[in-house]
Image (cartoon, rainbow, N blue to C red):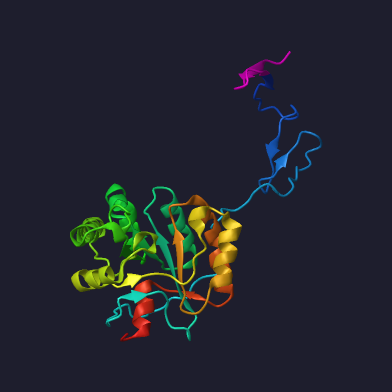
Amino acid sequence: MKRRKILKLSSGALIALPACSSKKGDGGSKIGKHGASSSGYGGHPVRLGANTQYRPPAYMNKGLRNPNMNLPSHFSGKSVTHSRGLSNQPYVAMTFDDGPHPQNTPRLLDILRTRNIKATFYVIGSNVDRYPHIVRRIVAEGHEIGNHTYTHRKLTALSNSELRREMRRTEDAIVRAAAVKPRTMRPPYGALLQRQRSLIFSDFTYPTIMWSVDPNDWKRPGPSVVRSRILRGAHNGAIILAHDLHAPTIDAMPGTFDDLLSKGYQFITVSQLLALKGQV
């Protein structure tokens, strides 16, 4: 009687396995010429069917890529608020607020890199101080950083000195993390008085960046709804609002990007969008 090994499974069940043997015809299997497994029943190779259970990662697309573009990013002018770019060019600026997030932002960066898309991240200063390595990665991969305040407070309720402190603390955090200065700002909730916009423009040279497409992804309507809302609202010169704070938003991005690329849109940063507008 052949010796058998006893294997205890994690469920507590026991299974008997035949002892290893180098003898031919012992019922074991051997590897054929091309690496196929041969059974002990006549030596016929075992052919495995396709693995229909495998699904590629969500950020694997169909080969669609944003083109490499050498566009200027220096802008000037007197306009303190922008919500869109030129309407005669198929450029859009994808923007993400409230990060960086320790899980969602790196996943988003993977999705963007696969498609060669450059985005603009409006970061919260306190999150920058928590995750400076993510901010460094954002900058290293060619994306733009914008100022989204340090504590995400409603700015219309602040004094001028408190407003300046929110801007300055965030700028300092970004410089510490990635050695770059933000060039634009976005107010939390889109709330900023006209006199405050002028003050920020005068003191920090930040124009206030609003948006022309808002999928209301912060309400978490689901990835398919976010995707359809962005696609439906997209237009030449669009500034698209989204939040990398929410995982369902990141789930929506691969299909959203592929839809927009397939329609001929090209992704650029907010500064590039403003530079194309020229003196405004």
Q: In the displayed structure, would residue 232 be above or below residue 173?
A: below
**Residue 255 visible in image:** no
- At a point 43% along the width and 58% down the height, the residue shown is 109
User: Residue 122, percent across and down?
Assistant: 35, 62
Residue at the limit of the structure toward the right, as seen here:
42
User: Residue 66, percent across and down?
Assistant: 49, 72
Q: In the displayed structure, would residue 31 be above or below residue 187?
A: above
Quarter holding residue 230: bottom right
**Residue 52 visible in image:** yes
Compare residues 277 and 257 and report the one nearer the observer: 277
User: Residue 86, percent across and down?
Assistant: 43, 83
Is 158 included in the stretch rendered in magenta? Answer: no
Q: In the displayed structure, would residue 125 be above or below residue 236?
A: above
Specify whether 146 is left or right of 12: left
- At a point 64% along the width and 48% down the height, the residue shown is 54
Q: Which residues are magenta?
A: 1-14
Compare residues 262 and 46 and report the one nearer the observer: 262
Count of marks placed on residues: 0
Which part of the image, by quadrant, shows the N terminus?
A: top right
Which part of the image, by quadrant, shows the C terminus?
A: bottom left
Is 12 included in the stretch rendered in magenta? Answer: yes
- At a point 51% along the width and 54% down the height, the residue shown is 219
- At a point 56% along the width and 60% down the height, the residue shown is 226
Q: In the displayed structure, would residue 130 be above or below residue 60?
A: above
Compare residues 106 and 10 and report the one nearer the observer: 106
Compare residues 197 and 116 and report the one nearer the observer: 197
User: Residue 82, percent across and down?
Assistant: 37, 75
Specify whether 36 is left or right of 122: right
